[in-house]
């Protein structure tokens, strides 16, 4: 006998808005705006796109609300804050008016509308929010002629999973009306100072918080602030942190000056400006010339230089005349985690594992092998670390784009990385209290594990079709040629330090021994991603990776070529130039990818 058909369960009634809020909602008809897609990290557009089209942001936010559904928004809490760039203040008001109309009961806002990305992530978790809205285009230039951006954070605090961003993009194409409340008298909500404001008899509450306070308290749980305070008081110690006129200035002051007792001049460009002072807050040596110069002054007495980007999630670590590569930084933090950072040393059994994005040079793999812990290799984009962090498979992760973090928060965290390096330096300082420099720590790592060379060649502003042609050409060319073949085992590394790129290769140039295209399946939730970068492997053990940036705000594309090579430690290996080691491989990658032919570019726009 057939079982009786299951009774269709009635649809759960949609939770509805409190009547007083509903009465204040203004409904404005709208039509979909094409192209409201999200990239690696939310949506980024020229600020002018939003200024010139008053429906742009409301349409997108309505798509967020529609994709989330009333089951998530009504009665829930939300966090909002941004990097302070031009249009931040306007956008905060739009978010508040639409959050109330969507039925959110409570919105936590950073004072002045400011929250760094890691602070936002932490606040989402701390307040049990249904999500967070981060108003940032990260390291992209700001101001009326610069870019603007927005991203949605999941309840974990981390980037929204692709399933949600896909629903949001679909919702942008179906939006017919925008719903926002009128707070009365055409006024917005005053978010300038901390405090709670209640509307419609408490049906909607805006909680304005000190953006840095909770963030610094969280770092206090991760690091030994007493030990760091004592360390930075060592005679001769000096820090310069470049906030790049973006969001981290107030955080750096609360952390380095107020909590650790460093002098105020430790912070450069510490006041957030709407146009980031005209700079490009991407914390690489190329974009922090004043910081690099300050460190290089003989006798300046500086030990550590650092910088963070527009929204405070990236980090740059420098010593006098010396820059740490992101790949080395992750490897070194992994090496020192259990001895230098209480958050990790407290953990029974040590680090469970670590992760790096695929294009990131594999320096950390050697440390992980020594520690006998797994390394996960993920696609570019922090969201791929999220499930590994949440499942406890990894406690540390990082990427070549100057992002590193631990599992104290579901985002990368620039000032965390600076504190992590302070902790490493404090641990490395010898018993006599002698300061040990950044370069000495890195060379110590090379001596133990060998040296990984890495660089990124960026071809910026290439027509999208040309960048696509490069990738397609590789797929139908070298990738197809090696299809079905196993990648040969890596050759024994060359042991001399002359820096030439022909080791293991023909004398007239590097020899390609394998090519493939990276795809990934998340081992925790089974989500997957294909076409995440073409990899070219050379006989010397060097590697080239090509992908197209997912964070461009304009129609043009940035083609990225990532290069890495490895040398075991030996005479001279510490003194060769990265450019000498990787130049030949890079040239061969450009030739194989037909970059000049397909893009008209003979050389990269920038070498990072
Ligand atoms: C953002 C993400 C990072 C990612 C980076 C890649 O910063 O938060 O996780 O590594 O974008 O940017 P790209 O321009 O290379 O796509
Ligand atoms: Zn950023």
Image (spheres, rainbow, N blue to C red):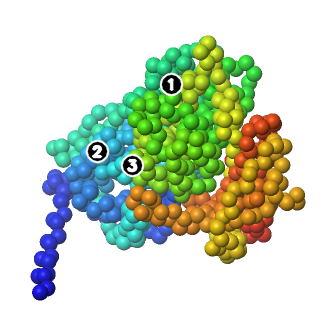
Give the mark nearest the N terminus, 3 or 1.
1
Q: Distance between the residues labelled 2 and 3?
A: 16 Å
Determine which quarter of the picture holds residue 128.
Answer: top left
Q: Farthest residue in the right direction?
A: 508
Task: Check disc 3 and report its element: helix, strand or loop.
Answer: helix
Q: Residue 89 location in percent, x, y?
A: 42, 45
Q: Say if 167 sits above or below 151 in the image.
A: below
The one of 487 and 322 positioned closer to us in this rendering: 487
Tag 3 residue: 390
Residue contact at pointers 1 and 2, CB within 8 angstroms: no
Q: Residue 154 location in percent, x, y?
A: 37, 52
Report whether the residue tagged 2 is closer than 8 Å to ligand 1: no
Report whether the residue tagged 3 is closer than 8 Å to ligand 1: no
Give the mark nearest the N terminus, 2 or 3.
2
The one of 375 and 302 positioned closer to us in this rendering: 375
Task: Check disc 2 and report its element: helix, strand or loop.
Answer: loop
**Is residue 389 rendered to the left or right of residue 280?**
left
Tag 1 residue: 256
- Nearer the observer, disc 2 or disc 3? 3
Tag 2 residue: 128
Picture residue at 59% right of the left edge, 15% below the top: 431
Give the mark nearest the N terminus, 1 or 2.
2
Picture residue at 45% right of the left edge, 37% below the top: 350
Residue contact at pointers 3 and 1, CB within 8 angstroms: no
Task: Check disc 1 and report its element: helix, strand or loop.
Answer: helix
Q: Residue 73 location in percent, x, y?
A: 26, 55
**Is residue 265 rendered to the left or right of residue 201?**
right
Please state, as top left, top right, bottom left or bottom right, where the N terminus lies in the image.
bottom left
- Nearer the observer, disc 3 or disc 1? 3
């Amino acid at each position: 006998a057939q079982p009786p058909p299951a009774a269709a369960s009635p649809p759960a009634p949609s939770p509805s808005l409190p009547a007083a809020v509903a009465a204040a909602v203004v409904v404005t008809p709208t039509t979909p705006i094409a192209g409201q897609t999200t990239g690696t990290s939310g949506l980024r557009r020229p600020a002018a796109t939003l200024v010139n089209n008053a429906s742009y942001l409301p349409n997108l936010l309505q798509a967020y609300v529609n994709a989330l559904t009333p089951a998530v928004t009504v009665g829930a809490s939300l966090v909002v804050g941004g990097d302070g760039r031009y249009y931040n203040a306007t956008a905060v008001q739009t978010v508040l008016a639409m959050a109330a109309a969507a039925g959110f009961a409570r919105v936590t806002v950073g004072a002045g509308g400011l929250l760094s990305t890691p602070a936002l992530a932490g606040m989402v978790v701390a307040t049990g929010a249904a999500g967070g809205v981060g108003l940032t285009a990260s390291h992209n230039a700001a101001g009326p002629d610069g870019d603007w951006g927005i991203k949605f954070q999941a309840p974990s605090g981390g980037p929204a999973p692709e399933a949600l961003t896909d629903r949001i993009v679909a919702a942008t194409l179906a939006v017919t009306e925008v719903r926002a409340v009128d707070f009365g008298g055409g006024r917005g909500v005053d978010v300038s100072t901390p405090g709670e404001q209640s509307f419609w008899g408490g049906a909607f509450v805006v909680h304005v918080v000190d953006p840095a306070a909770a963030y610094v308290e969280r770092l206090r749980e991760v690091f030994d602030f007493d030990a760091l305070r004592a360390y930075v008081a060592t005679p001769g110690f000096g820090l310069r942190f470049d906030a790049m006129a973006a969001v981290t200035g107030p955080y750096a002051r609360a952390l380095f000056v107020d909590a650790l007792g460093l002098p105020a001049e430790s912070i450069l460009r510490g006041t957030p400006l709407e146009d980031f002072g005209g700079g490009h807050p991407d914390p690489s040596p190329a974009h922090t010339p004043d910081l690099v110069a300050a460190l290089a002054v003989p006798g300046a007495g500086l030990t550590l230089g650092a910088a963070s980007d527009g929204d405070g999630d990236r980090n740059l670590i420098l010593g006098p005349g010396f820059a740490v590569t992101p790949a080395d930084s992750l490897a070194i933090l992994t090496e020192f985690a259990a001895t230098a950072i209480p958050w990790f040393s407290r953990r029974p059994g040590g680090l469970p594992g670590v992760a790096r994005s695929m294009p990131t040079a594999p320096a950390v793999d050697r440390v992980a092998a020594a520690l006998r812990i797994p390394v996960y290799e993920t696609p570019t984009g922090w969201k791929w670390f999220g499930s590994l962090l949440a499942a406890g498979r990894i406690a540390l992760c990082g990427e070549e784009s100057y992002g590193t973090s631990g599992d104290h928060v579901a985002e990368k965290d620039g000032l965390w990385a600076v504190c992590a390096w302070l902790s490493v330096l404090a641990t490395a300082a010898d018993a006599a209290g002698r300061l040990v420099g950044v370069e000495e720590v890195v060379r110590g790592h090379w001596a133990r594990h060998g040296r990984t060379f890495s660089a990124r060649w960026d071809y910026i502003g290439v027509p999208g079709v040309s960048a696509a042609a490069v990738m397609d050409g590789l797929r139908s060319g070298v990738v197809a040629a090696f299809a079905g073949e196993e990648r040969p085992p890596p050759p024994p590394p060359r042991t001399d330090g002359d820096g030439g790129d022909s080791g293991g290769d023909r004398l007239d140039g590097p020899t390609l021994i394998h090519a493939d295209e990276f795809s990934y399946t998340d081992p925790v939730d089974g989500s997957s991603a294909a076409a995440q970068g073409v990899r070219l492997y050379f006989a010397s053990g060097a590697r080239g990776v090509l992908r197209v940036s997912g964070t461009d705000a304009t129609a043009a594309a940035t083609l990225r070529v990532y290069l890495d090579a490895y040398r075991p430690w030996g005479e001279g290996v510490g003194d060769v130039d990265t450019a000498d080691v990787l130049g030949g491989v890079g040239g061969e990658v450009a030739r194989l990818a037909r970059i000049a032919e397909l893009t008209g570019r003979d050389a990269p726009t920038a070498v990072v």
